[in-house]
Image (tube, rainbow, N blue to C red):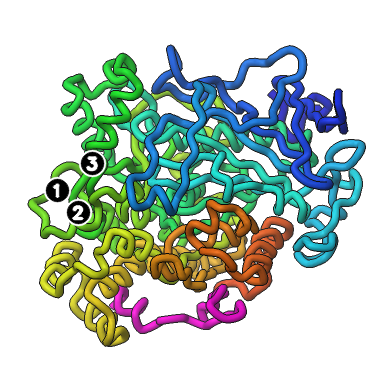
Amino acid sequence: MTTPDQDQDAVRGTGSGAGGAPEAVLVAGRVSGAFAADGVARFLGVPYARAPFGPRRFRAPEPVEPWEGVRKATEFGPTAPKRPYAPPLDALLPDPAVEGDECLNVNVWAPWGPEGPEGSEGPEGPEGPTAGKEGGTGAGPVQGVCGRPVMVWIHGGSLLHGSNAVPVYDGTAFARDGVVLVSANYRLGVEGFGFFPDAPANLGLRDQIAALAWVRENIAAFGGDPGRVTVFGESAGAISIAALLASPLARGLFRRAVVQSGAPMALPPERARRTTEAIAKRLGVPATAEAFAAVDRELLLTAQTEVTAKGSPLTGSGHSFQIVVDGEVLPRDPAEALTATGVPGGNEVRGRAKAEAEAGAGAGAGAGAGTGVEAEVGSGAGRSPKGVLGEAAGNGPGDSLPYVAAGSGSSRASEPGVDSAGVDLLLGTTTEEYRLWFVPSGLVERLSPLMLRLALWKTRVPSRTARVYRANRPQARPGEVLGALATDKLLRVPLNRMADARLRAGTAGRTFVYEFGWPSPVLGLGACHALELGFVFDTLDTPEAEALTGPGAPRELAAAVHAAWVAFASDGDPGWRTWDEERPVMVFGPERPSVVSAPREDERRSWEE
């Protein structure tokens, strides 16, 4: 396989092939795409690894086999086996499914001229995010000077849902503005995050690493620079990125990262296996990869859906798939690795992060009789708070990964987080994450004061913290108070700690923090989880984005958010101050984007006292 230091003649864009379609020559063979817009080519469903079924089921990803001739890449490839979101979220989060086995595939959107992929003006891109084409937020392409910045999208969905075929994730706007955009599929549910004694751990995470390795080897064919890769993701995708930051196997595969509405977390093996064991019990088979591989795919999906239908980090009950600390992909809990390495007072930070992760991530199988809240929160949600305010994955011991970053051998496993200190980081949340689940389910209306007290007791929320939140929301319903606490406990506070740790350690990589605060009028969702996605991708016109935003969402806000992500990928500066003692946060909405110092600081500090 080729690397950036080896001969790159094997990968190149070739302009137009037969019929004027854009073509690119990859390590495995030639692909033919289509034009998505003027000056933008797209290549859909390009495999980055072999189909993970048959003898390769529950195994680490393997390099794709070369093909002869020109492979057509004009339609979305197969999606990982999954079920749609349950009502009412299915109407808010459309999740298309494409049948087929080759689900380990990527989509690529790239600036493209008559002669092929177009280069940029310099090693850190054009001057600013607002230069260039009319109607765009990035610079117009300049033919063949050097590689474009690359962004690799890792989708969310509780590690049970989602794919790169979701229309909101269309990469045309990024390519229009000078970025090569890649979106990747990875294995979901028990196929990607089941925990077995006879299979590799964290298969879905290994898939993501394999996709990043594919980008390193092939992105020059689309005009991208393999040394300027930004990985970005939301929810479970953001939790995955936090794990990639802590993984020795992902070192050297990306230069920057964007963590949207997902905090670092993972489970120890003894807890991660509980969901797999519950599915095995329901199926009546041993909890082994060998036994699961013999089960019909649809039957396995049915059992998986039934077992994970309820559960909440707020009560510590139910089942979910979580990333696991397996000793290989993840030698250490990302929450510890990213808040304690090289940080004065790191033991205190590490201990607090671990205690809160254990209290908030859910206790796995049958964690107690419950208070009645878990039934309200988890029932029928599909992408329930367990998946949003605490999504991740999990698996067991296994084979070494065939795609490994250069110099990332096991001898370095004792140094997690060393290289992540040099990665530029953009991280943040929406203001009201919880409303995506609490509002459609009716929990905001139904939660009683007694249920609130029981939930706060079970999740170990300090009484002083609850008092601060109540005092700041004198007219709020109990469900809104609980939701605000959950948003901060499981997302905002951990991400602030991550930014603080990097500041104290004096990391070489810069850190920027944002908050998305524009409120959707749809169903009273407010600034809920996943709302920012149509703004980030500048795809507000799609019906799938309108399902969350409603019609008439502010295009000027989408332009500002999208431009910030483009600028960050281009040169590591989204357009506001880096994180410092004044805690600057760029707040996007409801008014004009502006930097706010330490928003709701009394609430954040109440978790630390």
Q: Which residue is mark 1?
A: 367
- Residue 221 is tagged as none
- Which residues, given as a range, are shown in magenta? 581-609
Q: Does the stretch in magenta take in 415?
A: no
Q: CA distance from mark 1 to mark 2?
A: 6 Å
Q: Which residue is mark 2?
A: 316
**Quick one: label 1 or label 2, which is nearer the N terminus?**
2
Report which quarter residue 562 is drawn in.
Answer: bottom right
Residue 294 in the image, given as x and y percentages of width and height: 31, 14
Q: Is residue 366 above or below residue 604?
A: above
**Gap between marks 3 and 1, in whole Å?**
11 Å
Q: Quadrant of the C terminus?
A: bottom left
- Drawn side of residue 223 relative to residue 602, left or right: right
x and y, in percent, of residue 346 in the image? 38, 63
Mark sitting earlier along the chain (3/2): 3
Indicate the amino acid at tag 1: Ala
Foreground of the two, 400 or 597: 597
Q: Is residue 322 above or below residue 195?
A: below
Question: Residue at position x 39%, y 70% from top?
Answer: 524
Q: Is residue 80 left or right of residue 382?
A: right
Dot 2 surroundings within 10 Å: few (below 14), some, or many (20 or more)? many
Label 1: element kind: loop
- Residue 83 % position (x, y): 37, 36
Q: Are marks 1 and 2 in contact (CB under 8 Å)?
A: yes
Location of the N terminus by quadrant is top right
Kind of element beneath mark 2: loop
Residue 492 visible, this orientation = no
Q: Residue at x 19, y 68 (%)?
A: 447
Q: Which residue is mark 3?
A: 271
Of callouts 3 and 1, the N-terminal one: 3
